[in-house]
Amino acid sequence: MKFSNGCWLQKEGCECFSPQEVYYTTVEERKVTLCAPTYRVANRGCTLGGVNLTITVTSPMPGVLRVQTAHYLGIIRKAPEFELNLGDGEILDVENTDERISVTSGSLTLDINKLPFSMTYRSGGRILTKSAGKDLALMKTDWKGLPYDKGDLKDTYIRQQLSIGVGELIYGLGEHFTPFAKNGQSVEMWNADGGTSTEQSYKNIPFFVSNRGYGVLVNHPEKVEFEIGTETVTRTEFSVPGDYLDYFVFDGPSMNDVIVKYTDLSGKPALPAPWTFGLWLSTSFTTNYDEATVMSFVDGMLERGIPLRTFHFDSFWMKEFHWSEFIWDDRVFPDPEGMIKRMKAKGLNICVWINSYIGQEAAIFKEGHEKGYFIKRTNGDTWQWDMWQPGMAIVDFTNPDACKWFQDKLEVLLDMGVDCFKTDFGERIPTEDVVYFDGSDPKKMHNYYTYLYNKTVYELLERKRGKEEAVLFARSATVGGQKFPVHWGGDCWSDYESMEESLRGGLSLCMSGFGFWSHDIGGFEHTSTPDVYKRWAAFGLLSTHSRLHGSQSYRVPWVYDEEAVDVVRRFTKLKASLMPYLYRNAIYTSETGVPMMRSMVLEFPDDRNASYLDKQYMLGDSLLVAPVFNDRSEASFYLPEGKWTDFLTGKTYEGGKWYTETVDYLHIPLLARENSIIAINPDAPGPEYDYSENLIFCVMGLTDTAETTVYAMDKTPVASIKAVRSENTVNITVDTQKPCKVRLSGLADEIEAAGSMTYTVTL
């Protein structure tokens, strides 16, 4: 939100109350509290009135500081709040003098100058960011003077501005489809069902990371408004309504380190089961289908040699006007349990579409209404409207009984053989004339609702299927939503522009603590050309999760052309072959929070050319993917310094340069960085198999040392390799449970290896 009128003036009616000094300081073992008047206290008479701010500094973990600023301490702060791993807090290292107080946790220090008031965050001797003057402020937008202020906070906001240094860029804030670096953007944290082609977002995360190696989480579920180099071009500003602001600062020193610490606080992404990395196929949204149609799709994929792994039934597995009652439409699926068994016999997992909006034609509406399981209006009525479903109500997940009721309905489907759910929607949550069971603040619940929704479903899956098997396909999210993977990018059009914006949004989400991400291959709205579909298929099957889904038309490849069948088969099998490599990276993501799909700036923060790259990405730690975004078959990509090898063709490239290549539909630039080892099974039947079986270690661009480990599907290590180059000699140490091969780039012959042995190769 913007409050100022240029450098010197506030907007008409606005008044700014900023700390002018630190008057009192209270130092405890784990907390520092400051009394900060917003005026200079020249004499005792100055203490008879005016606005004071109380600033509290704590630390939940080393290298992280929490700053809470409040005006009125007597206000009851209503739920909900983000579920954070705060623990007991760190013991602070405090230096307190007449001029300054310094608070240190691990590598991060906050220096607060007492008079005049200022704040500086530093890591060692390096300044990360700072604020002074009017940067931290209580803002009144209808100010008539202290005697006339009602104290009701209706016209009150509180903001913090943090400095942006020369060359500093800001990333994250959730899945936003606007430019990747957020500098120059006004960004509202307000979940909306707006597609992928606007400034709206399904997944707003009030967390950003700076290329200077620090990050900030604004700890507010309600609307947070960011001004990233807009109102003041040298400031990141965040503001919230009311008189209380709570934020965390994370020291890296790298952006990856920031994300690790952020997910230490907000939760790590769960590890999806190996089968989820295979190809998912959907019925699409409003298409007509029955069991015969579904089985024709399944059989068509299998007959064409495409290893389909999961089939998804979208909305119309239920009757129209009956969403969501979780009952199969018996007009087209008279024997759903038998159908599921027949599909599972073909090696498939089953996913079905759900949401938490219950139309009044649904068989379960009356029960939910009478038992008070829906959000209510202030007069006690069930809250209803006609958007999305006529007369629909919304399940109130602040009510434990409503959560159990919702889970009970879904449990019937799990007992029938369904494996997982696509938890759609959760963005259009009302804020006016709304009452929640637990008294939660409706404005805070607007974004937070999706957390409770997905948590409720995910916990059911954990209980019924086990933690190792639980998975969602979710659209909306807020802070902590990464604990319930997987998330997909929402409703995009079926063209190259939408393919590009989808990737940009996904990389932004992955900079915000989310480890796994997917999108609708071929686009959702309308129907793409065969050209776009084939390029999108290559991109989609080199994303962490891969789903063919659309709106009004089917997405099976043969409806486009026969070459599309070849493309989907080619890249589905390629992804399956890469599972020893991909699964290792997935385990790392679940343990650290560092995403599997990494923006170039996240992986190469010191390469200035990587700062704005959003049309290519690292898939794991070693493979660079550069999708084709045009109908000219031109792939344009940048390679950071080092030796790079095309994993599909063996062609080598020198880094530090841009390249443009012409590639056919069966290829995509898939570049392995130097000193990497990619573990594969070239004959993989699908995403699930013994990853130590038929194993080939591909040693790529070895100039120094490379090593890797292969894990079984239960996460136990089953094979490892280390390769060390010295001039024209390579020493290779292999430790495997089963025979394997080593493929060293530049050598024609593969090395047969087994057990624990060391091999010496002369180049």
Image (cartoon, helix red, strand yellow):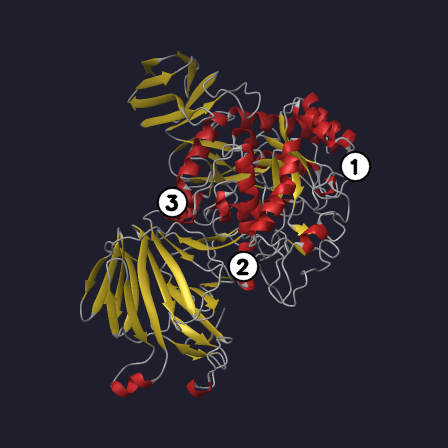
Pick whichever, 582 or 714, lies toward us: 714
User: Image check: 454 left or right of 656?
Assistant: right
Q: Which mark is residue 260?
A: 3
Residue bearing mark 2: 438
Compared with 741, 488 (above or below) is below
Are discs 2 and 3 less than 8 Å apart at CB? Answer: no
Asked if residue 604 can be seen in this view, the reply is yes
Residue bearing mark 1: 330
Residue, x 33% and y 22% (percent of image)? 723
Asked if residue 523 can be seen in this view, the reply is no
Q: Gap in Å between the C-alphas at discs 1 and 2? A: 38 Å
Compared with 482, 125 (above or below) is below
User: Image check: 564 left or right of 167?
Assistant: right
Are discs 1 and 3 less than 8 Å apart at CB? Answer: no
Residue placed furthest toward the front: 371
Q: Amino acid at mark 1?
A: Asp
Q: Amino acid at mark 2?
A: Asp
Circle 3 — which element? helix
User: Image check: 669 left or right of 159?
Assistant: right
